[in-house]
Amino acid sequence: MRAATVLFAAVWGLLFGSFLNCTAMRIVRGEDWVRARSRCPKCGHTLGAEELIPVISFLFLRGKCRSCGEKISLRYPVTEIVFGVLCALMMLRFGISVMLLRSFVFACCLFVLTLTDIEARLIPNGCLLIALVTWFVTLPWLFAGWRDFGTHIVAMIGFSVAILCLSLIMDLILKKDSLGGGDVKLIAVIALYLGVIGTMFMLIIASLLGIGFAVVNGKFRRGTAIAFGPFLSAAGLLMALYGEPLVAWYVSFL
Ligand SMILES: [Zn+2]
């Protein structure tokens, strides 16, 4: 039974990952993302249903458009697989529950803004708003006392104000934008989901990921700005899924 639900979540994730990837691309290109049909970006060939099956279509078409032979970007199967795995992990962690629903919407929002941030340094307000509203809408089922509620609200306001001040000071010192406004809003929303301690861990993990990526890519030396949203999102999802055992494991060393 458990294996069946996890498998279902993985397949659901593949399909939804495909939809979210297209949504992200349409947001960047300013297209209507509800009604628009999927097309080949090279020749405009409208994709039929059999060409829209996640991963399988890609393998079946050997990564090429059926109409013009243009190579299909690896972005499609990669994003689908990543989101499929993510959904399977969420099902394993939370089972069928309101927490699963909340985490799923949170993951969808972070996934889309990660893709738009990588492609166009854009963090859509819509994604942040949906995540924010979802947290409050699911609250009646997940309410764990006023004290717990307070730590989440304090985390959202406290971290965003602190980081906004810090980035403004950095801007003055470095005389350039250190952190985008989108990043600050993103931190606020993730902090609402994680609470105070979870957000502290999230920021440390995101910074390590960002620095690690910059060093590997050699961007640190050249001083090129990198999109921070993907690292915040990855760390936020990691903490949303495994924050409790991770914090407990860390505390056991103290
Ligand atoms: Zn084509």
Image: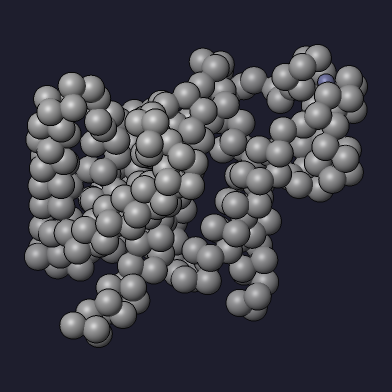
Q: Could you say where residue 235 lies in the image, as x and y percent from the top left? A: 37, 55
225 with respect to 153 (left or right): right
Q: Is residue 130 above or below residue 71?
A: below
> In percent of the image, x 27 and y 56: which residue is there?
204
11 with respect to 125 (left or right): right
Q: Could you say where residue 203 lies in the image, as x and y percent from the top left? A: 27, 53
The quadrant in which residue 160 appears is top left
> In percent of the image, x 85 and y 27: which residue is there?
65
Figure quadrant, ligand 1: top right
Q: Could you say where residue 156 lies in the image, as x and y percent from the top left? A: 17, 47
> In percent of the image, x 62 and y 44: which residue is there?
79
Task: Work out whether residue 227 or residue 92 is closer to the camera in this orientation and state it.
Answer: 227
Residue 119 can be seen, yes or no: yes
Task: Work out whether residue 157 or residue 227 is closer to the camera in this orientation and state it.
Answer: 227
219 with respect to 42 (left or right): left
Task: Work out whether residue 129 or residue 59 is closer to the camera in this orientation and state it.
Answer: 59
**Quarter that holds the N terminus:** bottom right
Going by the picture, which residue comes out furthest to the front?
221
Residue 193 can be seen, yes or no: no
User: How many tags in the picture?
Assistant: 0
> In percent of the image, x 45 and y 69: which residue is there?
94
Colour mapping: one colour
**Quarter that holds the C terminus:** bottom left
The quadrant in which residue 99 appears is bottom left
Q: Could you say where residue 89 lies in the image, as x and y percent from the top left? A: 53, 65
63 with respect to 181 (left or right): right
